[in-house]
Image: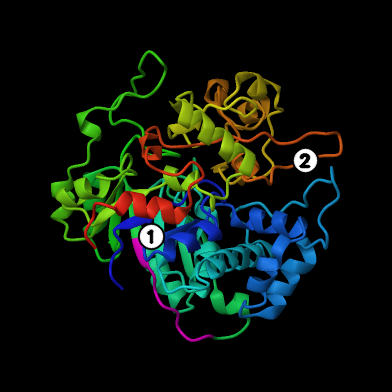
Amino acid sequence: MSEPILIQGGMGVGVSGWRLARAVARTGQLGVVSGTALDVTLARRLQEGDPGGHLRQALARFPVAAIADRVLGRYFIPGGVEPGTPYRPVPRLGLRPSRARDELTVVANFAEVFLAKQGHDGPVGVNYLEKIQMATPAAVYGALLAGVDYVLMGAGIPAEIPHLLDELAAHRPGQVTIAVAGAGDAVHTVGLDPRALLGRSMPPLARPRLLAIVSSHVLAAYLARSANTRPDGFVLEGPIAGGHSAPPRGRMRLDPDGEPVYGPRDEVDTGKVAALELPFWLAGGYGAPGGPARALAAGANGVQVGSAFALCRESGLDGELRQRLLRRAADGTLEVRNDPLASPTGFPFKVAGLPGTLSDTLVYDERPRLCDLGYLRTPYIKQEGGVGYRCPAEPVDIYVRKGRPAEEADGRRCLCNALVAAIGLGQHRADGYHEPALLTLGQDTGFLAGLPADHSAADVVRHILKDVAR
């Protein structure tokens, strides 16, 4: 398989869904599905009646029918959930084993990748976040079962993922170490035993290539130092890229608008990365013609682009929200702020300003603080012993009772609920409550110049690569 010049970035919860990844892969470039929270998006789409029947078609191809049938029996509602009826919850991530959670996660990742790979022979990848460690083994295994070609991992140091891929591709038990605050030298892990889950043996799977998403040549060198941690390549992400970004190195300084200030220490030395003799792609501000040429001249294999695809027709964004973003970007009124506080992870997060969403101070102040999805919860050792879970986006008094200062909760948004709402699957209740969305985008929207007003994924690929000889 030849390396792609263009990687479509994995975005949000379901923004980079199977429709978008499939459309990009059909052009011969790398289409990527977001692997974040696929369990809840599958469960809620099934509760919406699975319009078009795509998910049920994918689940019918899952290698163990009994597992897929259990997921369908628990979540599928013919005709869709009644208006105002809350979605049925999914099992939350945790250190304790849960067969129901593993089955749902494996099936959801299988379905997303399976659908993305239909009707073409282009490459398909899946993007995961190291910050959401407790989902990783089951999620990765589901993607492998569907024949995923690439795994991309960011938001942390994916040092254990090469070995995990080796083990799961052979259907051997795989695990990752979980960071537990206050655990000292005690080691906590989460894993998956494929044969125990499926109840039978299977032939070995193709082992996908791993691309580590990093923002530092130092981190790239650290991962490349050993066969145990070495990925198959890197995506080097700059600070203007969408979604989360690494905080500035050294002491955090904010500009007059309250955004983090990046300096020379935050620039990736592409020469040092090239010296590692692994392929790499550049991300953040490369989504317009000329971007790939600049990257190739720097020794890269190409570019990763997100925002241009987030605003295309095949994007998983709620259609009305996508159109509002496009109009604001086109008339120059769209502001994307790199908010140092919005994300519970502590990473700066790009917030696209849009009235009626959580970027709106009034909406944020009126939303009750709650944490009922919990993907970004941090496990910690409780004073009385045992493991608890906390998140700075949960109610402040509860967070304080879990041993953390109240100021850590200032300005935090519940990204789990808000990003699910951004694709039209926000929680709703009989009392009229609807979960507000939060939108994220890269800070450079110059890529829109030259694109059709309502552009497709194929339009984006042609636009970006028009000056590249292939």
For mark 1, what is the residue?
160
Q: State left or right for residue 103 relative to residue 28.
A: right
Q: Residue 204 colored magenta?
A: yes
Kindly identify the amino acid type of the residue bearing the numbered disc 1. Glu
Q: State left or right for residue 36 relative to residue 164.
A: right
User: Does the magenta stretch mainly form a helix, a strand or a loop?
Assistant: loop
For mark 2, what is the residue?
428
Above or below, comparing residue 100 to residue 245 in the picture: below
Asked which secondary structure carries label 2, the reply is: loop
Where in the figure is residue 399, as x and y percent of width and height? 62, 30
Where in the figure is residue 7, as x and y percent of width and height? 36, 56
**Range shown magenta:** 202-210
In the rendered picture of this protein, how many numbered marks are placed on residues? 2
Where in the figure is residue 51, as x and y percent of width and height? 72, 60
Q: Residue 391 colored magenta?
A: no
Residue at position x 31%, y 30% in the image? 248
Above or below, comparing residue 198 to residue 142 in the picture: below
Quadrant location of residue 390? top right
Quadrant location of residue 112? bottom right
Where in the figure is residue 457, as x and y percent of width and height? 46, 54
The disc, 2 or 1, on the residue closer to the chain's N-terminal end is: 1
Above or below, comparing residue 261 to residue 388 in the picture: above
Residue at position x 54%, y 20% in the image? 407
Q: Quadrant of the C terminus?
A: bottom left
